Amino acid sequence: MIIEPRCIVAPSILSADFSRLGEDVASIAPTGAQWVHLDVMDGQFVPNMSFGPKTISDIRECSPLVFDTHLMISSPERFVTQFAEAGSDIITVHLEATTHLHRVLQAIHDEGKQAGVSVVPSTPICMLEPILSDVELVLIMSVDPGFGGQRFIPSSLEKIKALVAMREQHDLSFRISVDGGVNERTYSDILSAGTDVLVVGSAFFGAEDKSKFTAMLQGLEY
Ligand code: DX5
Ligand code: ZN
């Protein structure tokens, strides 16, 4: 009997060691995690900076996994082509970072990539209603974006449940991803709320045994 993982695990390389980034990216696939989460920060939309398309392009050859790019940048429409050409498979933009959201999502699809939309913890889920039929992924931020290792904001659970209900109501099939404060204490409630994808940064890279940790999140024997 083949047992399927109950969720997709997407380790965030924000918590990797950037002095050996290629090796850390290469180490993700053997753990059984399915995606690589790439946190791009511009120092304007969020109070931190990380990396850009050049880094993604350089590490693309280090992993066969899905590259899940999370753009925490203002006016992301300026960079859709660069992040697509760098090797992203999914490009997620923030609802709060652009005015013409349909146009950005269309640009991502025009590049042949999957499109995602994300909201910060203080943005109500109902704001997403007009664009839900235009995305393959909704990324619920469960911390204020900008840094790894922050504490999960519990009200995120209600947002996940509301989004599951909206997906059902509109007969849609986008995936629901949760990002921020996912760890061995919080993951169970997050999955019970209806999450499909767990983004996990500090808890993954800080785990003693990354394969065991990944299997635990996926509900698989180890
Ligand atoms: C935060 C980023 C997250 C972050 C998660 O702004 O979007 O992806 O790396 O880190 P943890 O899992 O440590 O909260
Ligand atoms: Zn992220």
Image (cartoon, grey):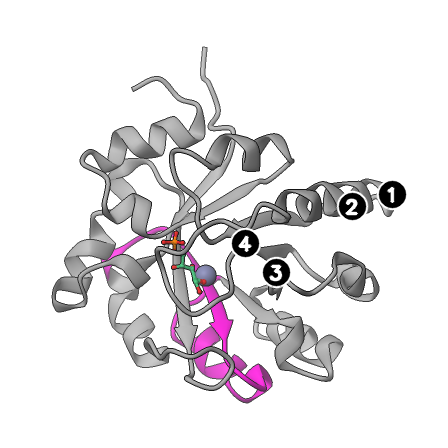
Label 4 C-beta lies within 8 Å of the nearest ligand 1 atom: no
The CA distance from mark 4 to mark 3 is 6 Å
C-alpha separation, residue under disc 4 versus residue under disc 1: 23 Å
Q: Nearer the viewer, mark 3 or mark 2?
A: 3
The residue at which mark 4 appears reads as: 142
Against 138, residue 92 (above or below) is: below
Q: Quarter holding the C terminus?
A: top left
Residue 126 drawn at (x, y percent): 81, 59
- Looking at the rendered structure, the secondary structure element under dot 1 is helix
The residue under label 1 is 169
Amino acid under label 2? Arg
**Amino acid type at image mark 4:** Ser
Mark 4: give few (<14), some (14-19) or many (20+) Cα within 10 Å. many
Q: Given contact means CB atoms under 8 Å apart, are the residues at marks 4 and 1 in contact? A: no
Residue denoted by label 2: 167
Q: Which residue is mark 3?
A: 121
**Kind of residue sitting beneath label 3:** Pro
The reply to whether the residue tagged 1 has its Cβ within 8 angstroms of ligand 2 is: no
User: Image point 38% across, 34% down: which residue?
Assistant: 184
In the image, the segment drawn in magenta is 62-89
Q: Report x, y in % for residue 205.
A: 25, 48
Q: CA distance from mark 2 to mark 4?
A: 19 Å
Q: Residues within 10 Å of mark 1 (few under 14, many from 20)?
A: few
